[in-house]
Structure formats: structure tokens, C-alpha cells
Amino acid sequence: MFVVSGPATVVLLVIVSPLIETLIMAAILELLLRFLPPVAAIVLSAIGWGIAHSMVAPAWGLVIWWPFLIFSTLYVTWSKRSIWMAVAIVFAVHALQNFGPALLLLRS
């Protein structure tokens, strides 16, 4: 784990992390959708992200699965129109969700 402070905190939490996580989520969902119905793929994706975030802090995983349920649903819904549109929408929603906490960390 590494420590960042100042504006780098906002950049990492609002731009870098949501972009990387969205691209990983899109790839995983595309794979899951080849073998599972959409609802199962969405739920499995959200649970997976909850588990992944639990490795950092157990309670965090219990909370984070819900936003990833929404992100996964957005991706699956919008990917029918365009995969890149789906990535852009999920990235934007994820970035906006992280913006408030990033500002709080910036102030501390």
C-alpha cells in the first residue's frame, strides 16, 4: 500500500481508479455474459468486487458490492448500445461516486 496526498488523491480516486476498475469490470462482465444470463453475471460481478475490496478492509467489501451492482447493471444495459458508451457511463458514475470521499481525504 502506498500513501498519496494532495491533488494526487483526487486524481487517483476520481480518475485513475474508476477508469481501471471499469475496464476490468467490462472485461469480466463480457466473459461472464458468454456463459451466464445477464442477471447472474451482474450479481456475480458485484459479489466479486465486494470480495476484492474486502481484501483491503472487510467492512468495505460489505458496503461496496451495492455500487458495483449498479455499475454492473449500467454496463450490461448500455453495452447493448455500445461497449464504449457503457464504459464511459460506468466510469462517469463511478468517478462521481468517488468525488465526495476524495474531497474529504483532500481536506484531511
Image: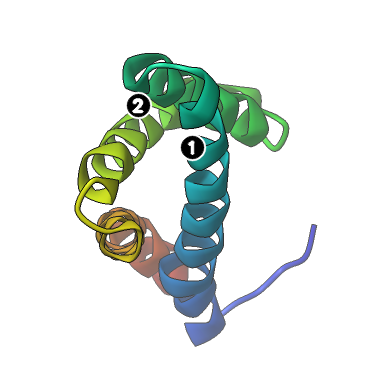
In this image, 2 relative to 12: left or right?
Answer: right
User: What residue is drawn where x is 35% and y is 26%?
Assistant: 66
Neighbourhood count class around disc 1 (C-alpha, 10 Å): few under 14, some 14–19, many 20 upward:
many
**Camera sees residue 108:** no
Q: Earlier in the sequence, mark 1 or mark 2?
A: 1
Tell me if label 1 and label 2 are in contact, CB under 8 Å: no
- Residue 78, how many percent across, how many down? 22, 48
- Residue 104, how many percent across, how many down? 37, 62
* Label 2 element class: helix
Give the image quarter of residue 96. bottom left
Q: Amino acid at mark 1?
A: Leu
**Which quadrant: the N terminus?**
bottom right
Instruction: Identify the residue under disc 2.
Output: 66
User: What residue is drawn where x is 25% and y is 59%?
Assistant: 89
User: What residue is drawn where x is 51% and y is 29%?
Assistant: 34
Q: Nearer the viewer, mark 1 or mark 2?
A: 1
User: What residue is drawn where x is 38% and y is 17%?
Assistant: 37
